[in-house]
Each structure stands twice: as structure tokens, then as C-alpha cells.
């Protein structure tokens, strides 16, 4: 499902017009993105949790040249499903 289909589903379930449904979807995803950008954990009971983890810096190897390359630390978003969601 893409964003347009999700907007159409929100529109169908709520009876809102297209612009209102689009704003609602944008606000939800924008809020999630903002929370994760600041490193906060987001938990939705019955659905799951989004957690931001920092990866460690490491050494990697360039496949073509074989030269060692330093890979800097970075943020990774992990999603963990709720047990209710799995059932």
C-alpha cells in the first residue's frame, strides 16, 4: 500500500474530503519522522514500537580495490511488532 491508497482508506473510513485525509496522513507520518529524528522511541500499543539505534563505527572493505574504508556511526530505525499484532 502506498501513501495515496492509505489516504483513500482514511477518507473512506472517516468520510473526510481528500484534502483533510491527506493532511491527517501527512501529520501522522511527519510526527513519527520528527520523533525518530530526535532519537525518541515511539510505541503504539497493539501495533509495535519504533526504536532508533546508533550503529558502531566499523571498518569495511572496498570490493573493487580491496582498500579498507572507515564506516561512520549512523542512526538506524528498528521496528518491533507487538504480540497482539502477531496474533
Image (cartoon, rainbow, N blue to C red):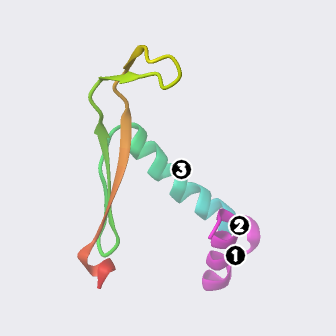
| Mark 1: few/some/many CA within 10 Å (<14, 14-19, 20+) | some
Q: Is mark 2 on a helix, strand or loop?
A: helix
Residue 46 placed where, x, y %?
31, 76
Residue 13 occupies quadrant: bottom right
* Residue at left offset 50%, top offset 16%: 65
Instruction: Answer above or below: position of 35 versus 85.
Output: above
| Mark 2: few/some/many CA within 10 Å (<14, 14-19, 20+) | few
Q: What stretch is highlighted in magenta?
A: 1-20
| Mark 3: few/some/many CA within 10 Å (<14, 14-19, 20+) | few
Q: CA gap, disc 2 to disc 1?
A: 6 Å
Disc marking residue 4 = 2
- Mark 3 vs mark 2, foreground winner is 2
Q: Is residue 28 left or right of residue 85?
A: right
* Residue at left offset 33%, top offset 26%: 73
Disc marking residue 28 = none
Q: CA gap, disc 3 to disc 2?
A: 15 Å
Front-lying residue, 12 or 46: 46
Residue 86 placed where, x, y %?
31, 79
- Helix, strand or loop: magenta stretch: helix
Instruction: Answer above or below: position of 54 versus 25.
Output: above
Q: Do the residues labelled 1 and 3 touch (CB within 8 Å)?
A: no
Q: CA gap, disc 1 to disc 3?
A: 18 Å
Residue 71 colored magenta? no
State which quarter of the image contains the C terminus: bottom left
Q: Are marks 2 and 1 in contact (CB under 8 Å)?
A: yes
Q: Mark 3 points at which residue?
A: 30
Q: Mark 1 points at which residue?
A: 8
Amino acid at each position: 500500500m502506498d501513501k495515496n491508497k492509505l489516504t483513500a482508506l482514511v477518507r473512506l473510513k472517516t468520510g473526510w474530503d481528500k484534502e483533510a485525509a491527506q493532511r491527517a496522513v501527512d501529520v501522522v507520518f511527519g510526527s513519527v519522522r520528527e520523533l525518530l529524528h530526535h532519537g525518541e522511541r515511539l510505541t503504539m500499543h497493539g501495533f509495535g514500537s519504533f526504536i532508533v539505534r546508533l550503529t558502531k563505527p566499523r571498518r569495511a572493505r572496498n570490493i573493487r580495490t580491496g582498500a579498507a574504508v572507515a564506516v561512520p556511526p549512523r542512526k538506524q530505525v528498528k521496528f518491533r511488532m507487538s504480540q497482539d499484532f502477531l496474533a
